């Protein structure tokens, strides 16, 4: 457990630093760190939804540049998970639902 929290803290720190520096790190590395931070945040922790949203934000950034179908599919999954994990009165819930709607629109538009 102690090693787990140390690894989680390191992943969070690296993820936050890489998010800030557009030129010092590839989008692929940002996505990997986002996934690690998300996966190391237990669902019982308050930061779990924020970790999902942060991971989705970086994945969305990569999708906008590369337009990978796999990224879009994962975005839909992450946006759904974030929305479903929020309490009904969470102030981020409406924005999260709107982001999910946008991802689904892109998904269906792309598939024709």
Image: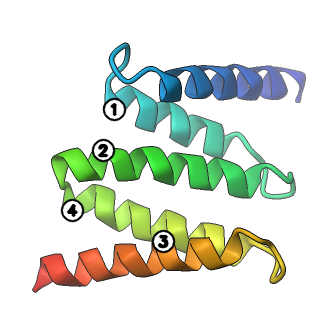
Q: Check disc 1 and report its element: helix, strand or loop.
A: helix
Alpha-carbon distance for marks 1 and 2? 6 Å
- Disc marking residue 62: 2
Instruction: Say left or right for 101 vs 8.
Output: left
Alpha-carbon distance for marks 1 and 4? 16 Å
- Disc marking residue 69: 4
- Residue at (33, 67) in percent of width and height: 73
Within 10 Å of the Cα at label 2, are there few (<14), some (14-19), or many (20+) other Cα atoms? Answer: some
- In the picture, the quarter occupied by the C terminus is bottom left
- Disc marking residue 6: none
Instruction: Say left or right for 27 vs 31.
Output: left
Q: Residue furthest left?
A: 112
Pair 2/3: label in front: 3
- Disc marking residue 99: 3
**Mark 1 or mark 3, earlier in chain:** 1
| Coordinates of residue 23 in the picture (x, y in percent) | 33, 17
- For label 1, the residue is 27
């Amino acid at each position: 457990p102690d090693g787990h929290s140390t690894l989680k803290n390191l992943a969070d720190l690296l993820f936050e630093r890489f998010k800030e520096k557009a030129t010092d790190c590839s989008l692929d590395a940002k996505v990997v760190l986002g996934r690690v931070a998300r996966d190391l945040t237990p669902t019982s922790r308050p930061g779990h939804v924020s970790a999902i949203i942060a991971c989705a934000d970086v994945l969305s950034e990569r999708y906008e540049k590369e337009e990978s179908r796999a990224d879009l599919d994962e975005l839909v999954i992450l946006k759904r998970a974030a929305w479903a994990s929020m309490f009904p009165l969470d102030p981020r819930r409406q924005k999260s639902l709107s982001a999910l709607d946008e991802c689904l629109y892109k998904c269906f538009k792309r598939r024709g």
